[in-house]
Image: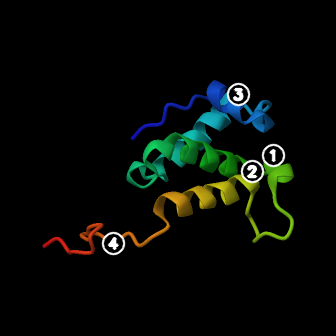
Amino acid sequence: MATTWTATTFKARYADFKTVPDATVTAALAEADTETDARVYGDSYERAVGLLAAHILCTTALGERARVDGAAPGETTYLLERKRLTRKRAGGPFVIGQRLDDTVEE
């Protein structure tokens, strides 16, 4: 599923990145889009893509302010929020072939 984010809409939502070149933002959005499964996030898909793109941008020197003291190395405020969203959307077991009523497809 392709995201509807553009560099302009991303920078409007995440103002911390307003000085980042559009091409850099677009590349981070494309990477985040390929790493985000719409089946997991459902109607939160766009938000998940945006959070991951923000995290990707923060893992460079540009994102030093978003790093979290006391968190695991490489974690940013955006990654922590994405993890929270992931737990909310897909916190339970996700097994291929298993239905919500615990029966198994054959």
| The disc label shown at residue 12, or none | 3
Q: Please rate how many residues cluster around mark 1, counting C-alpha atoms within 10 Å: few if below 14, some from 14 to 19, many from 20.
A: few
The answer to the question of whether label 1 and label 2 lie on touching residues, with beta carbons closer than 8 A, is yes
Q: Nearer the viewer, mark 3 or mark 1?
A: 3
| The disc label shown at residue 62, or none | 1
Image vertical order of residue 93 relative to residue 43, above or below: below
Q: Secondary structure at mark 2?
A: helix
| The disc label shown at residue 58, or none | 2
- The residue at 69%/32% (across/down) is 13
Q: Nearer the viewer, mark 4 or mark 2?
A: 4
Q: Nearer the viewer, residue 103 or 61?
A: 103
Q: Which residue is mark 4?
A: 95
- Which comes before the other along the chain, label 3 or label 4? 3
Q: Please rate how many residues cluster around mark 2, counting C-alpha atoms within 10 Å: few if below 14, some from 14 to 19, many from 20.
A: many
For the residues labelled 2 and 3, the Cα–Cα distance comes to: 17 Å
Q: Nearer the viewer, mark 2 or mark 3?
A: 3
Give the amino acid at mark 3: Ala
Q: Nearer the viewer, mark 1 or mark 4?
A: 4
Image quadrant in which you'd find residue 16: top right
- Which comes before the other along the chain, label 4 or label 2? 2
Q: Please rate how many residues cluster around mark 3, counting C-alpha atoms within 10 Å: few if below 14, some from 14 to 19, many from 20.
A: few
